[in-house]
Image (spheres, rainbow, N blue to C red):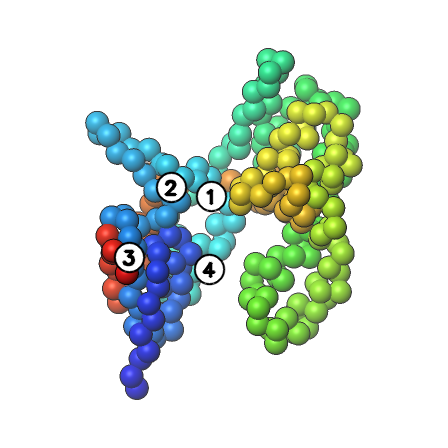
């Protein structure tokens, strides 16, 4: 049987992922990247013996990466060394106050008691709200190609479609956050997550509050050796599956 050849333009994470999956399915894959290195937004800078990540500084939902390596027949435990990040982030405000955000519930409670005692209950309610969005939308938007209508009409997905209103699509991120919190510092902290995908919290749907759940409940991770290790591992995996990788490819 003659395998079909597929061309992929771009060498970012999504392109590398597509290349791995298609190659594993038996396609002949050729990937073309205009830059001399792969990775897209996830890249690195080297100078004077030092290395710096120039893109994402945090990995969330590592089970997505693990599923990809499993799909390709590789043990994910031998692929990346993930380090939980705690605190996830430290915030500095113009009034000289500082706030450390943790996945660990006890540490986060202590931070709220110290700086936002009146908002502690609201935070618990907010996470419950974000969890509802995650549980309703994860199967629908993360694991199902929504452009393939037949795959939406399954016993696993139909219940999520019937609960569409629970993903809070008709309010903005900002409106939803302001319904929980009154302190402008907290509003600013949780509104910023809309910018993770370049969205504006004043116009983006409140569904994006799912990101707060992902970070504060599922946690954030760093890859030992640098975030760019993910690109290196994916490109090595793709090459091992027969993907032809072409960098510095001119536009035509």
Q: Which residue is mark 4?
A: 67
Q: Residues within 10 Å of mark 4 (few under 14, many from 20)?
A: some
Q: 118 or 192: which is nearer to us?
A: 192
Q: CA distance from mark 4 to mark 3?
A: 33 Å
Q: CA distance from mark 1 to mark 3?
A: 31 Å
Q: Which residue is mark 2?
A: 227
- Location of the N terminus (image quadrant): bottom left
Q: Is residue 71 left or right of residue 251?
A: right
Q: Which mark is residue 251?
A: 3
Q: Which residue is mark 1?
A: 59
Front position among marks 2 and 4: 2
Q: CA distance from mark 2 to mark 1?
A: 8 Å
Whether residue 83 can be seen here = no
Kindly check if marks 2 and 1 are in contact, taking CB atoms under 8 A apart as contact. Answer: yes
Q: Is residue 34 left or right of residue 64?
A: left
Front position among marks 1 and 3: 3
Q: Residue at x 57, y 68 (%)?
A: 147
User: Which of the two labelled residues, at mark 3 and mark 2, occupies the earlier sequence position?
Assistant: 2
Rendered image quadrant of residue 192: top right
Residue 182 pos. (x, y %):
76, 27
- Location of the C terminus (image quadrant): bottom left
Q: Secondary structure at mark 1?
A: strand
Kindly check if marks 2 and 4 are in contact, taking CB atoms under 8 A apart as contact. Answer: no
Q: Residue at x 35, y 63 (%)?
A: 8
Residue 175 pos. (x, y %):
74, 39
Kindly check if marks 1 and 4 are in contact, taking CB atoms under 8 A apart as contact. Answer: no
Q: Residues within 10 Å of mark 2 (few under 14, many from 20)?
A: many
């Amino acid at each position: 049987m003659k395998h079909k050849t597929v061309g992929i333009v771009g060498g970012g994470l999504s392109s590398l992922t597509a290349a791995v999956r298609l190659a594993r399915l038996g396609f002949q894959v050729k990937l073309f990247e205009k830059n001399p290195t792969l990775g897209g937004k996830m890249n690195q800078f080297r100078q004077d013996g030092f290395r710096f990540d120039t893109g994402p500084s945090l990995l969330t939902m590592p089970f997505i990466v693990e599923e990809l390596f499993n799909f390709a027949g590789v043990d994910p435990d031998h692929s990346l060394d993930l380090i939980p990040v705690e605190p996830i982030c430290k915030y500095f405000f113009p009034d000289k106050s500082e706030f450390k955000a943790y996945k660990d519930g006890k540490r986060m409670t202590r931070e709220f008691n110290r700086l936002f005692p009146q908002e502690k209950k609201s935070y618990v309610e907010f996470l419950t709200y974000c969890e509802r969005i995650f549980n309703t939308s994860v199967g629908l938007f993360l694991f199902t190609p929504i452009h393939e209508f037949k795959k939406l009409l399954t016993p696993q997905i139909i219940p999520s479609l019937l609960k569409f209103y629970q993903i809070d699509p008709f309010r903005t991120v900002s409106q939803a956050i302001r319904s929980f919190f009154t302190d402008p510092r907290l509003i600013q902290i949780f509104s910023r997550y809309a910018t993770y995908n370049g969205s504006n919290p004043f116009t983006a749907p409140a569904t994006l509050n799912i990101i707060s759940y992902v970070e504060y409940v599922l946690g954030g991770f760093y890859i030992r050796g640098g975030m760019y290790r993910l690109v290196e591992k994916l490109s090595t995996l793709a090459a091992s599956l027969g993907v032809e990788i072409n960098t510095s490819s001119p536009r035509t």
